[in-house]
Amino acid sequence: MNISELQGKPKTELLTLAKEKGVTKAESLDQQDLILQMLKSEVEQEGHVFCQGVLETMSDGYGFLRQDTMLPNHADVYISPSQIRRFGLRNGDMVVGQGRPPKSNEKYFSILQILAINDIDPEKSRERPHFGSLTPTFPDRIINLEHSPGELSTRLLNMIAPIGRGQRGMIVSPPKAGKTMLLKAIASATATNYSDVHLLVCLIGERPEEVTDMKRSVKGEVISATFDEPVENQTRVAELALERAKRIVESGKDVFILLDGITRLTRAYNLAMPSSGR
């Protein structure tokens, strides 16, 4: 049973699965507690559970596998310092492994065995290069954004401002001009035309319903921190998303990052900075 898969299911489907697993008083539990009880039941019945998440390392050497939002919660999975050192794990690694439920004096699930790191064998992951040692080059391969006869915006982008692999760009426009719609069109075109490109959408300071809409309409990884989150969480999610992209590149894959929006992220960093007193 996969933690990430369970978190993506609606409450009604979780209740049905919980009854099959023999979880008692499932209706009175909230979604996160229900998932934890189901995982414990799975462990008791089959002896193991599969855990998956993006690694965030702490200053003390240990780490946690973060789930969908990349923010801390009680469904995170603990990874010991010895496992991080053994496999050379880095911030932003996508780790899949076999875990165990928390013991009486513990709060989190723990990884017993790591099965994959960024979709590659754990032993091979130690051989990957560091992002800082890679050689940057000028873009020389264009990304074709034309994917639907009725979508004119991406066709115009191809003509006026073509995008290449390794290129940076910024959309500047007045409010309510359709920046998010254009980003969705770019994301759909990339996902449709390039199955080898990992699409990473980072939403900072957006409304929750816009995050839901993006997840439903884009075939890619969506990382978000909504406007009601503290600014520290918004900057934290943005930095972890960048680390996630670096780890994918180190594994030999191409990443397409779409950030919405840089103005809100800048505002969050300004608010998170300590006051100078002047």
Image (tube, rainbow, N blue to C red):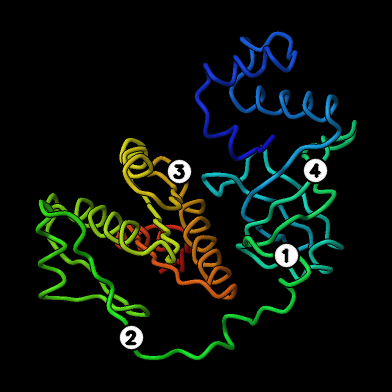
What residue is rendered at 82% in x and 37% in y?
Answer: 48
Please name the residue that numbered disc 1 is placed on: 121
| Helix, strand or loop status at disc 3 | loop
Q: Earlier in the sequence, mark 2 or mark 4?
A: 4
Residue 16, image x and y in percent? 60, 14
Please name the residue that numbered disc 2 is placed on: 139
Q: Which part of the image, by quadrant, shows the N terminus? A: top right
Q: Earlier in the sequence, mark 2 or mark 1?
A: 1
> Could you tell whether 119 is left or right of 78 in the image?
left
What residue is rendered at 60% in x and 15% in y?
Answer: 15
Amino acid type indicated by mark 2: Pro
| Helix, strand or loop status at disc 1 | loop
What residue is rendered at 11% in x and 54% in y?
Answer: 149
Amino acid type indicated by mark 1: Asp
Density class for disc 3 (Cα within 10 Å; few <14, some 14-19, many ≥20) is few
Please name the residue that numbered disc 4 is placed on: 99
> Could you tell whether 9 is left or right of 110 in the image?
left
- Label 1 and label 3: CA atoms lie apart by 36 Å
Establish if 114 lies above or below 217. Answer: below
Establish if 98 lies above or below 260. Answer: above
